[in-house]
Image (cartoon, grey):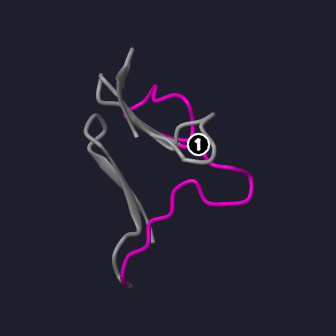
Amino acid sequence: MFVGSGNTGFSVWDDSEQTTPRFIVERTGNVGIGGTKANKKLYVLGDTTNYQILAEQPSGYAGFSIKSTTLAQTWSWI
């Protein structure tokens, strides 16, 4: 774990591989997972064989939703 350096306010590193942080939070509040950048509110870098984001919920509920306050719409996937 590392706290504070340049734009990064907080980062978590793997003990055995210290080339790429596992999780970073920029001083702006942006969060990055699996990569070296956090240029969006949430940036997730996956690989070609696994899910980048997996949301599981009990039957009958949306597993993942995106809400646009500009368009006043919500998109949900079960």
Q: Nearer the viewer, residue 29 or 57?
A: 29
**Residue 65 pos. (x, y %):** 37, 58
> Is residue 7 found left or right of 33 in the rendered image?
left
Q: Residue furthest top?
A: 6
Would you say residue 49 sits in the magenta stretch?
yes
Magenta stretch, main secondary structure, is loop
The local crowd at label 1, few if under 14, some if 14 to 19, many if 20 or more residues have their Cα within 10 Å, is: some
**Residue 64 pos. (x, y %):** 41, 62
**Residue 54 pos. (x, y %):** 50, 63
Would you say residue 68 sits in the magenta stretch?
no
Q: Nearer the viewer, residue 49 or 2?
A: 2
What stretch of residues is rendered in magenta?
34-58
Residue matched to label 1: 45
Q: Residue furthest front?
A: 16
**Residue at the image position 46 percent from the left and 30 percent from the top:** 38
> Is residue 41 found left or right of 37 in the rendered image?
left
Q: Is residue 62 visible?
A: yes
**Residue 34 pos. (x, y %):** 56, 43
Using the image, determine if residue 5 lies above or below residue 76. above
Q: Quadrant of the N terminus?
A: top left
Q: Is residue 42 visible?
A: no
> Is residue 25 found left or right of 22 in the rendered image?
left
Using the image, determine if residue 49 lies above or below residue 71. below
Residue 19 figure quarter: top right
Residue 57 figure quarter: bottom left
Using the image, determine if residue 39 lies above or below residue 50. above
**Residue at the image position 61 percent from the left and 60 percent from the top:** 51
**Residue at the image position 44 percent from the left and 66 percent from the top:** 55
Q: Residue furthest right?
A: 48
Using the image, determine if residue 60 lies above or below residue 44. below
